Image: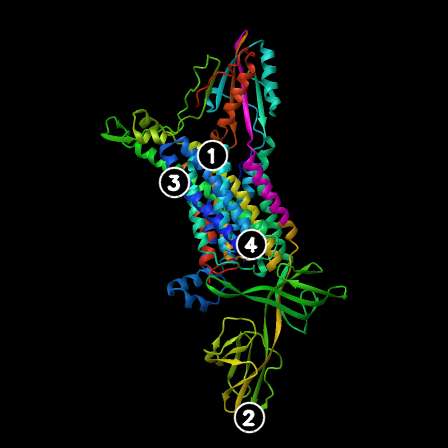
């Protein structure tokens, strides 16, 4: 006989404790609670903003806390990914430790009157005939009958919706499939954004697909509401000529809700804007080193020969000529651009320039905003995990429905008595406790009791029962 | 806009609102006095309100040509309508009319609040111009409505439980530990006092149920205490617990399908099925809390009061997800100006 090494005992104990902890439903629920709390923080705290945003919009201690604990990017934090990992681990352990073993419970004798849902019906007849009647009664109502002799006594067991005991297993499998589908995207998928100015051609780096934006169109309608006129976007559409892997050029429209699929990668209409041609002159003559292409909002360029930079901050569709500021109508009726000047990193001024005019930058320099060209912003995404996520969602839903709407139950039936008077003891257990089955059990017993009564010549009906 | 259609829309709106408000008052009367007549009137008013509101949504669609779910006005209207429909369906099947005051009251409040968001006819923004709006929004709103009904039932559970504990005060048993001088106060409580219900049925049949779960209320009723008699007339705690479970068992799959269809729609509209938008994550939060409810309900020791509290908290997350996020937090589903 060999003595097990202390290390192996320790490992066994540790494994046993680990399994018992992770198979515990209350532990799983606690993990759900932490997941919920982290998710709530993510909803309340703005996500993915620049640190300056938090300092400007939050109280200083909250801003510091947010940034120090990385609450600004909580969904991609180690804590968030870790808790989902723990939930998946708990789900796996629970599945193998609790859900799969809990298939069909063994056929065993019980003390009928110790089970809260129990009934006794006295019937008459030969023992074999009574047994047959009991079995055929439950069998006719969809119960699966099994018989077993235990301790010299014959027991009848009736089961219903046994297969539905696997509902939780199905739901867990669905959850795992969704997680697998999501992981496939992380491993093999990609996504990105791009912009293309009308009349220009771009190549998507990941796919080498080529897009030429023939024209971008939009529709914004003024709508009169109870609060006044609002300008409601109605449509955005990019007319493109594209070529995929086969090199064949095709024409297509890309709209919101109508993405374009090219070789398995989807291209979405996500945004649009106004690219503007800027001209920098010195003493009335264009200078070299100024912007050589139309700029999009947010882009900047240096003023040659100085430490200053100019950023194209915002396009203004309609300048309010009364105030000289931005009008409510975003459509380019009387357009202008807002520019910001920077000395190094420091902002030194902002100005609104009507298109077709220029402003004095000092020392003989002038900046002019010439014309605008519409550009389209597109998002693209390749996600090979989507079919799996879809299947997982369907499986999860099926598992939930099986678990919620079907009630696996077992009836234990025991015959006691002698000669021609038999007490049929019936007890019921379910996977969801007793209360949920009480009414159905009572109906079943009533039906059985009625089926055992000889037909009466009068229309007196079944014996009156006081409600429980 | 066609003035006849507008008049029809406004008339139906007023009928629905009047039916819900009156129905709430009638069901309060029924709840307090258990008058069968009030119950019948309440049922009629609930049905009239639901039919009028359904017709109003149809009339609005006909009048504007826009599916009436593109703004908070439309979705809150649908929420109150679905709440009343879920209530009527469960009440017919499980005799739940006693919660009518709560459901119709919330329906009236949400419908009234909805009208404050009625800005007139607005065409849908590009992201909402999709057939998914006809699938995703009704599913999600139906789940919210189910959870609202479950919230009313679990609140009633907690109310009855509170009275049970209150009536139980003073019935503690004093026990002394011999020789130690220590006296203990042990509360008398019997949650599962099984009793024989039909022993008198000609000796043929005997059914034992799970029995009374509010012995203090039963005792108070037996003493002739008016409050006890009134409370004893409410369904058992076990029944309220099961009703909550059954209603949530309808709401949770609806919410699951709602999240799935929303993800599918997001993939078509924005390029990713999950973008961690505040609305998406708030819906996930609600799903998590209801999943907690379902897991806890599998444990005997957690059924009853603990899961009733979980149901109440879970509905708070629904209100946060539905109104809090839409109104106060900027995101893709935002109504924040």
Relative to the observer, which residue lies in front, A317 or A284?
Answer: A317
Nearer the observer: mark 2 or 3; the answer is 3
Q: Is residue A405 magenta?
A: yes
Where does the magenta region start and end? A390-419
> Do tag 2 and tag 4 residues touch (Cβ < 8 Å)?
no
Tell me if I can see residue A10 in this picture: no
Q: Secondary structure at mark 3?
A: helix
Q: Is residue A163 left or right of residue B105?
A: right
Q: Which residue is mark 4?
A: B63
Q: Chain of mark 3?
A: B
Which residue is labeled 2 in the image?
A283
Callouts 2 and 4 in the same chain: no
Most foreground residue, A27 or A386: A386
Looking at the rendering, which quadrant does residue A301 occupy? bottom right
**Where does the image place residue B80, in percent across and percent down from the top left?**
47, 46
Point out the tag, 3 or 4, that comes first from the N-terminus.
Answer: 3
User: CA–CA distance between discs 2 and 3?
Assistant: 81 Å
Q: Residue at x 56, y 12 (%)?
A: A455
* Vertical order, A412 against A327 (above or below): above
Residue contact between numbered discs 3 and 4, judged by CB atoms under 8 Å = no
Does the magenta portion include B32?
Answer: no
Q: Earlier in the sequence, mark 3 or mark 1?
A: 3
For the residues carrying marks 3 and 1, which lies nearer the camera in this image?
A: 3
On residue B242, which mark appears? Answer: 1
Q: Is residue B237 visible?
A: yes
């Amino acid at each position: 006989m060999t003595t097990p090494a202390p290390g192996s005992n320790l490992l066994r104990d540790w494994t046993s404790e680990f399994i018992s902890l992770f198979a515990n439903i209350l532990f799983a629920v606690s993990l759900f609670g932490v997941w919920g709390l982290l998710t709530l923080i993510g909803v309340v705290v703005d996500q993915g903003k620049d640190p300056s945003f938090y300092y400007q919009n939050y109280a200083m201690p909250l801003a510091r806390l947010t940034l120090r604990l990385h609450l600004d990017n909580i969904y991609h934090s180690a804590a968030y990914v870790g808790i989902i990992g723990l939930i998946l681990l708990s789900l796996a352990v629970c599945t193998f430790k609790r859900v799969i073993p809990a298939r069909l419970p063994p056929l065993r004798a019980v003390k009928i009157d110790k089970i809260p849902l129990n009934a006794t019906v006295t019937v008459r007849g030969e023992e074999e005939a009574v047994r047959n009647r009991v079995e055929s009664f439950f069998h006719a109502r969809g119960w699966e009958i099994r018989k077993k002799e235990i301790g010299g006594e014959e027991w009848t067991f009736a089961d219903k919706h046994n297969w539905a005991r696997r509902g939780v297993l199905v739901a867990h499998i669905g959850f795992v499939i969704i997680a697998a589908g999501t992981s496939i995207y992380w491993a093999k998928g990609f996504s990105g954004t791009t912009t293309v100015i009308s009349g220009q051609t771009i190549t998507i780096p990941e796919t080498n697909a080529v897009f030429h934006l023939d024209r971008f169109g939009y529709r914004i309608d003024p709508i009169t509401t109870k609060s006044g006129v609002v300008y409601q976007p109605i449509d955005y559409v990019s007319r493109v000529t594209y070529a995929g892997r086969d090199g064949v050029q095709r024409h297509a429209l890309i709209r919101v809700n109508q993405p374009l699929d090219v070789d398995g990668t989807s291209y979405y209409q996500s945004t649009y804007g106004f690219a503007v041609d800027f001209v920098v002159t010195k003493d009335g003559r264009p200078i070299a080193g100024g912007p050589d292409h139309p700029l999009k909002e947010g882009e900047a360029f240096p003023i040659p020969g100085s430490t200053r930079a100019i950023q194209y901050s915002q396009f203004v569709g309609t300048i309010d000529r009364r105030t000289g500021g931005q009008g409510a109508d975003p459509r380019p009726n009387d357009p202008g651009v807002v520019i910001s000047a920077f000395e190094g990193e420091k902002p030194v001024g902002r100005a609104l320039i009507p298109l077709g005019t220029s402003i004095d930058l000092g020392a003989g320099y002038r900046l002019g905003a010439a014309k605008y060209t519409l550009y389209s912003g597109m998002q693209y995404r390749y996600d090979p995990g989507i079919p799996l996520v879809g299947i997982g969602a369907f499986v999860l839903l099926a598992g939930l429905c099986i678990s919620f709407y079907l009630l696996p139950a077992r009836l234990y039936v025991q015959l006691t008595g002698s000669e021609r008077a038999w007490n049929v003891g019936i007890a019921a257990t379910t996977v969801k406790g007793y209360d949920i089955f009480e009414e159905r059990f009572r109906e079943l017993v009533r039906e059985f009791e009625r089926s055992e009564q000889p037909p009466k010549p009068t229309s007196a009906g079944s014996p009156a029962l006081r409600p429980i | 806009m066609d003035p006849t259609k507008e008049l029809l829309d406004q008339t139906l709106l007023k009928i629905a609102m009047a039916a819900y408000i009156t129905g709430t008052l009638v069901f309060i009367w029924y709840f307090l006095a258990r008058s069968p007549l009030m119950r019948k009137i309440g049922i009629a008013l609930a049905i009239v309100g639901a039919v009028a509101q359904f017709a109003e949504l149809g009339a609005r669609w006909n009048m504007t040509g826009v599916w009436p779910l593109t703004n908070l006005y439309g979705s809150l209207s649908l929420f109150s309508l679905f709440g009343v429909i879920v209530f009527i369906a469960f009440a017919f099947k499980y005799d739940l009319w006693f919660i009518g005051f709560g459901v119709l009251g919330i329906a009236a409040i949400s419908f009234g609040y909805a009208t404050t968001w009625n800005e007139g006819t607005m065409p849908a923004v590009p992201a909402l111009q999709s057939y998914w709006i006809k699938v995703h929004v009704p599913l999600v709103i139906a789940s919210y409505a189910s959870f609202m009904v479950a919230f009313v039932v679990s609140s009633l559970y907690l109310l009855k439980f509170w009275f049970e504990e209150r009536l139980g005060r003073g019935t503690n048993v004093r026990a002394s530990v011999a020789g130690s001088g220590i006296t203990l106060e042990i509360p008398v409580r019997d949650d599962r006092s099984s009793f024989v219900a039909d022993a008198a049925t000609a000796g043929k049949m005997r059914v034992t149920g799970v029995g009374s779960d509010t012995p203090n209320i039963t005792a108070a009723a037996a003493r002739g205490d008016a409050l006890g008699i009134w409370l004893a007339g409410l369904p058992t705690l076990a029944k309220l617990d099961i009703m909550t479970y059954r209603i949530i068992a309808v709401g949770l799959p609806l919410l699951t399908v709602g999240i799935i269809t929303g993800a599918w729609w997001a993939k078509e509209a924005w390029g990713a099925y999950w973008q961690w938008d505040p609305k998406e994550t708030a819906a996930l939060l609600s799903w998590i809390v209801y999943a907690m409810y379902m897991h806890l309900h599998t444990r005997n020791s957690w059924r009853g009061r603990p899961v009733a509290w979980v149901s109440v908290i879970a509905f708070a997350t629904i209100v946060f997800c539905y109104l809090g996020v839409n109104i106060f937090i900027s995101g893709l589903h935002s109504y924040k100006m």
